[in-house]
């Protein structure tokens, strides 16, 4: 699981280890909340997690950036945008 052990994934998602085991072994169908939590914990695209399409580096990078931005304040986002505009674009 992308270098993450079951117990680590359980802690990162808040999903119990038995429930994760059921999902992994196909004994329980993933609901939308579980898909979201697992995909974000593993930093993968939700569509890829479900087995549709290829997960490219670009997709993984975008997922990681989204996760970082979600934890930022509006001020931090504003400063980041200014930095990107000035030094990268």
Image: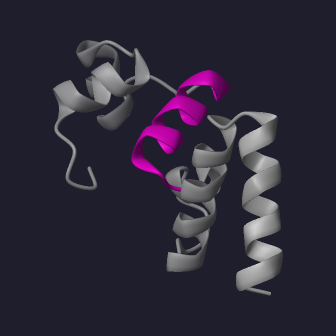
Q: Residue at x 50, y 77 (%)?
A: 57
Question: Magenta span has 75?
Answer: no
Drawn side of residue 36 relative to residue 89, left or right: left
Question: Magenta span has 35?
Answer: yes
Q: Nearer the viewer, residue 72 or 34?
A: 72
Q: Residue at x 66, y 28 (%)?
A: 32
State the image coordinates of residue 35 (x, y, percent, origin top left).
Answer: 56, 34
In the rendered image, the vertical position of residue 26 relative to residue 18, given as above or below: below
State the image coordinates of residue 40 (x, y, percent, origin top left).
Answer: 52, 41
Drawn side of residue 28 relative to residue 2, left or right: right
Locate residue 52: give its quadrant.
bottom right
Coloring scheme of the render?
Answer: one colour
State the image coordinates of residue 11 (x, y, percent, origin top left).
Answer: 30, 20
In the rendered image, the vertical position of residue 20 relative to residue 53, given as above or below: above
- Give the dominant element type of the magenta stretch: helix, strand or loop: helix
Q: Number of numbered discs present?
A: 0
Residue 22 seen by the camera: no
State the image coordinates of residue 49 (x, y, percent, origin top left).
Answer: 51, 52
The magenta region covers: 32-44
Residue 73 seen by the camera: yes
In the picture, the quarter occupied by the C terminus is: bottom right
Q: Residue at x 61, y 57 (%)?
A: 65
């Amino acid at each position: 699981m992308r270098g993450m052990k079951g117990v680590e994934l359980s802690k990162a998602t808040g999903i119990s280890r038995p429930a994760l085991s059921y999902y992994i072994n196909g004994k329980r169908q993933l609901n939308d909340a579980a898909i979201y939590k697992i995909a974000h914990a593993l930093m993968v695209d939700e569509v890829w997690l479900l087995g549709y399409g290829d997960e490219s580096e670009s997709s993984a990078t975008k997922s990681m950036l989204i996760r970082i931005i979600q934890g930022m304040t509006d001020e931090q986002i504003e400063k980041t945008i200014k930095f990107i505009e000035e030094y990268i674009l």
